[in-house]
Amino acid sequence: MSRLPTARRGGEYYRVVAPECVEPLDTAYSKAFGGRWNPSGEFGALYLNANVQVAAANARAQHAGRALKLFDLVPSARPELVTVDVPPLDVVDAASSAGIAALGFGEGFPFGASWPQCQAIAREAKAAGVPGIVSRSNAEATPTRVVGEELAIFEGFAVAQRDRRPFAAWYPDPIPG
């Protein structure tokens, strides 16, 4: 493999999806539009959350800067949570301090890191046959705090959907009244 630092990840992860999403493990949208760890039009990535707290932060982040916030949505339009089983994989390490330094990022990563920087690493990883990247979550990140980890699995690597829960059954904070 290349210069990329790796970490072993696997087990239970979570994906936040819209209630109308029919194929929650499909990477076609991310391939078409890109994301932090996949350049648009090149390859897809399945973005997963390491725990429910990270999933909740991502659900809130999807509405940051919008007129309608997460709790402004009618209950039936709020995101659902899909539980995903990930087999043990050696992925690029953009989560530990050592991995972040080896990739050339500052200790405050992901705060301030550009998508082109991350996508260049993802291209290298994909070309080397690495199945994905574990990263500190950018949802609600500050220069000194992150909520937790996310896992981006590149298209072509199999994961399995276990279950799917409506918003009221998974969201950890009390719903404002």
Image (cartoon, helix red, strand yellow):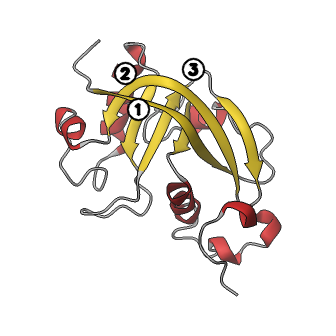
How far from the left and from the top, in percent, is residue 116? 34, 38
Decide: is 74 above or below 162: below
Which mark is in front, 2 or 3? 3
**Residue at position x 23%, y 40% from top?**
100
**Residue at position x 53%, y 57% from top?**
58
**Residue at position x 32%, y 29% from top?**
121
Residues at discs 2 and 1 in contact (Cβ within 8 Å): yes
Does residue 118 appear left or right of residue 163 in this picture? left
User: Between residues 172 and 66, which one lies in front from this camera angle?
Assistant: 172
Label 1 to label 3: alpha-carbon separation: 12 Å
Mark carried by residue 111? none
Does residue 121 appear left or right of residue 153 in this picture? left
- Circle 3 — which element? loop
| Mark 3: amino acid | Phe
Please report whichever mark, 2 or 3, sits nearer to the chain's N-terminal start.
2
Label 2 to label 1: alpha-carbon separation: 8 Å
Residue 69, picture quadrant = bottom right
Mark 1 is surrounded, within 10 Å at the Cα level, by few (under 14), some (14 to 19) or many (20 or more) other residues, namely many
Label 2 to label 3: alpha-carbon separation: 13 Å
Residues at discs 2 and 3 in contact (Cβ within 8 Å): no
Which residue position holds label 1?
A: 133
The image quadrant where one finds the C terminus is: bottom right
How far from the left and from the top, in percent, is residue 105? 20, 42
Decide: is 89 above or below 48: above
Which residue position holds label 2?
A: 125
Residues at discs 1 and 3 in contact (Cβ within 8 Å): no
| Mark 2: amino acid | Ala
Which residue position holds label 3?
A: 157
Please report whichever mark, 2 or 1, sits nearer to the chain's N-terminal start.
2
Does residue 173 appear left or right of residue 152 in this picture? right
